[in-house]
Image (tube, rainbow, N blue to C red):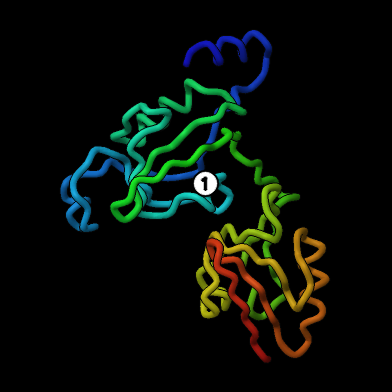
Amino acid sequence: VVKPLIEAALNGTDVKRPWLGITCQALTPEIASSLGLNYLTGAIVSNVHPLSPLKDHLQDGDVIVAINTKPISSSEEIDFILNTHKIGDKVSINFIRRGKAETLELILEEAPSLKTETTFEVTESKYLKGVVLAQSKNSKGMIVIDILKDSAALSLGIEKGDVLLKINTIDVSSMQDVKTALSKGVHGISLVIDKNGQIVNLRVQF
């Protein structure tokens, strides 16, 4: 854990740590009982960040039990294991989903940089106003990373983590694509949304 800090200090660079983009908490007997799980040691996933490299692999309620065969019982243990690896390393993650043991392999990445040029708050659309979008290097479309509480998008069922694939039949993968597509919706808006692997089509007439 200390070696990367020393190397970074000697090189005058920032330490870049691997990032999973998930929030976990220790699985207690009470939590296990409330979820109908047989009690086991692990860390239960409570949130998956919209830009997480695990977005298409883990979901809320999954229980991580080991990383590289090392048992996990808390989020702190996950952080410790990550800090012993560098970006580009491959790790295996063992987890339980609805009582079934699953395993996935992941190439570790650094946290994405959400700079102003890669995020975009929609302001000129009746139904998407207040939606904050980000470009993704790993997938097509624009990822919903935030929604203002008074946005009409909430009434359409749009949620953080959704990926907008098309707006008004136009593929969108940049801020300019979104602006161009929204300018076409004079009498309504149509959306194609990827909701955690499920494709949903929405259309609203003004």
Decide which of 93, 151 is in the foreground and name it: 93
| Quarter residue 132 falls in | bottom right
- Which residue occupies 41% across, 32% down? 67
Residue 203 at x, y = what percent?
65, 85
The residue to which callout 1 is attached is 54
Please give left or right for residue 99 compared with residue 48 in the image: left
In the image, residue 12 lies at what x, y percent? Answer: 68, 14
Quarter of the image that includes the C terminus: bottom right
160 relative to 98 in the view: left or right? right
- Residue 21 percent location from the top left of the image: 51, 43
Residue 98 spot, x, y in % from top left? 31, 56
Task: Give the quarter of the image for residue 81.
Answer: top left
Look at 47% across and 16% down and name the residue there: 1
- Residue type at mark 1 is Leu
Q: Is residue 177 left or right of residue 101?
A: right
Q: Quadrant of residue 59?
A: bottom left
Q: Residue at x 70, y 77 (%)?
A: 125
- Judge the density around disc 1: few (<14), some (14-19), many (≥20) Cα neighbours within 10 Å: some
Residue positioned 62% across, 63% down in the render: 163
